[in-house]
Amino acid sequence: RPLPRPVLDDSAPEWWLLERDAQGEIGLGGGSMGLCGVLAAAARPVSWDTLQSRAEALGADPDESDALLEGLVAEGLLIRASQSNGFQRRPTDAVDPTVF
């Protein structure tokens, strides 16, 4: 007897994160709306304050947004943008909001 088909919640977007590791391999994984929202905001160079505001708009505690962004820099997901004082996501990362 066949298994019942799973019911998918198509009312909310699902965020996917493509990431290249140190060996050059590309991985695909789900990302939280907060993480992917901050990385999407950093598609072009933006100021640290802009990224903090975006993180807080997506639910980060104002007292923790700075540490959250510093963690993304430490992990290499955010980098200092060349020729500006801003930050942007690492060019090899792609963020795709896909609705199912």
Image (spheres, rainbow, N blue to C red):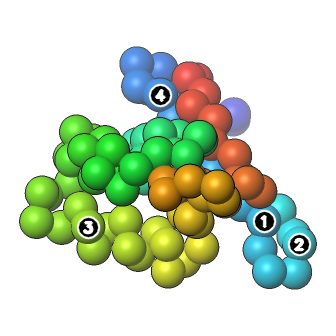
**Residue 52: image x %, image y %?**
28, 52
Q: CA distance from mark 4 to mark 2?
A: 28 Å
User: In which quadrant is the C terminus drawn?
Assistant: top right
Task: Please state which of the two labelled residues, at mark 4 or mark 2, is closer to the viewer.
Answer: 2
Rendered residue at 73%/54% (across/down)? 91
Q: Is residue 43 left or right of residue 41?
A: right
Rendered residue at 49%/54% (across/down)? 86
Q: CA distance from mark 1 to mark 3?
A: 25 Å
**Disc 4 on helix, strand or loop?**
loop
Label 3 CA crowd tier, 10 Å (few <14, some 14–19, many 20+): some
User: Is residue 15 in view from this perspective?
Assistant: no
Q: Earlier in the sequence, mark 1 or mark 3?
A: 1
Location of mark 1 (residue): 20
**Residue 79: image x %, image y %?**
58, 65
Q: Is residue 100 above or below residue 75?
A: above
Image mark for residue 66: 3
Q: CA distance from mark 1 to mark 4?
A: 23 Å
Nearer-the-camera pick, 94 or 78: 78
